[in-house]
């Protein structure tokens, strides 16, 4: 029987490969280790970087990913084969960004569940024309985009001791405007067993109210 690392589907060539749009950079931040990978267009529409380009982070910690394309804007999806069965399952799609704003560079993030086993897992990044929305299938042919494989190492979270030190709150914008999305994150990675998060809002910097569902280390409005 083949090892699971030999079982991943290889997408076929996109009909418009390298004609109008492709991935030029994928990078991570906020991890224990991160990568910044620039690439030219692959004529095969697929490149496997997983042997050499690896990011890592703790269970419960948030990892931010940046995606850059050239030509027309791409929407992106990311899968991580957390259970190492050689299949990128629907439940393992950790990022799905439609990119309706048609940005050539944007960021999104995901949090590693506590239930994921420590170890190195295959990560798949797929980008296709934004008009089709974020790719929903990890294997089917894309219209004009690319697929790139990486690796992601999950590190076991440690129990929380003492007082957490999250540092300052960081924002992707200096001045927020109504109807414009932005992301808030913590300066320091404080992921540990027993840590919980709750973001709050205030109209006057005096009275604070919990934001419903805002219980991760990163908040995207």
Image (cartoon, rainbow, N blue to C red):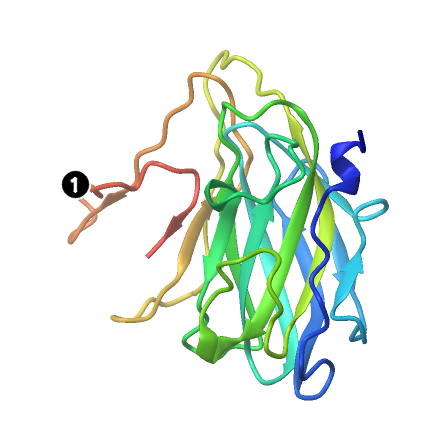
* Residue reaching furthest to the front: 1
Q: Residue at (42%, 22%) from the top-left corner?
A: 195
The spot of residue 81 in percent (x, y) is 62, 39
Please tell me how crowded label 1 is: few (under 14), some (14-19), or many (20+) other residues with Cα within 10 Å.
Answer: few
In the image, residue 116 lies at what x, y percent?
55, 26
For residue 122, which quarter of the picture? top right
**Residue placed under numbered mark 1 in the picture:** 209
40, above or below 137, in the image: below
Q: Nearer the viewer, residue 48 or 203?
A: 48
From this view, report whether residue 162 is shown above or below residue 29.
above
Work out whether residue 186 or residue 92 is closer to the camera in this orientation and state it: 92
Q: Is residue 115 visible?
A: yes
Tell me if 207 is positioned left or right of 122 in this view.
left
Residue at point 81% right, 76% down? 43
Quarter in which the C terminus is drawn? bottom left
Would you say residue 34 is visible in this rendering?
no
Indicate the quadrant where residue 67 lies: bottom right
């Amino acid at each position: 029987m083949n090892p699971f690392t030999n079982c991943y589907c290889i997408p076929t060539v996109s009909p418009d490969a390298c004609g109008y749009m492709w991935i030029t950079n994928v990078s991570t931040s906020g991890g224990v280790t991160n990568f910044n990978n620039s690439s030219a267009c692959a004529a095969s529409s697929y490149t496997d970087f997983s042997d050499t380009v690896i990011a890592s982070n703790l269970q419960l910690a948030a990892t931010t990913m940046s995606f850059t394309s050239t030509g027309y804007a791409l929407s992106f999806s990311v899968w991580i084969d957390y259970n190492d069965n050689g299949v990128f399952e629907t439940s393992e799609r950790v990022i799905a960004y439609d990119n309706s704003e048609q940005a050539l560079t944007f960021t999104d993030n995901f949090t590693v569940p506590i239930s994921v086993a420590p170890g190195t897992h295959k990560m798949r990044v797929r980008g296709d024309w934004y008009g089709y929305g974020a790719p929903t299938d990890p294997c089917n042919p894309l219209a004009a985009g690319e697929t790139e494989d990486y690796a992601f190492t999950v590190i076991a979270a440690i129990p929380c001791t003492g007082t957490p030190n999250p540092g300052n709150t960081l924002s992707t914008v200096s001045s927020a405007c109504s109807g414009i999305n932005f992301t808030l994150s913590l300066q320091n990675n404080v992921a540990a067993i027993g840590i919980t998060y709750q973001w709050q809002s205030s109209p006057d910097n005096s009275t604070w109210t919990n934001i419903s569902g805002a219980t991760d280390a990163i908040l995207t409005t």
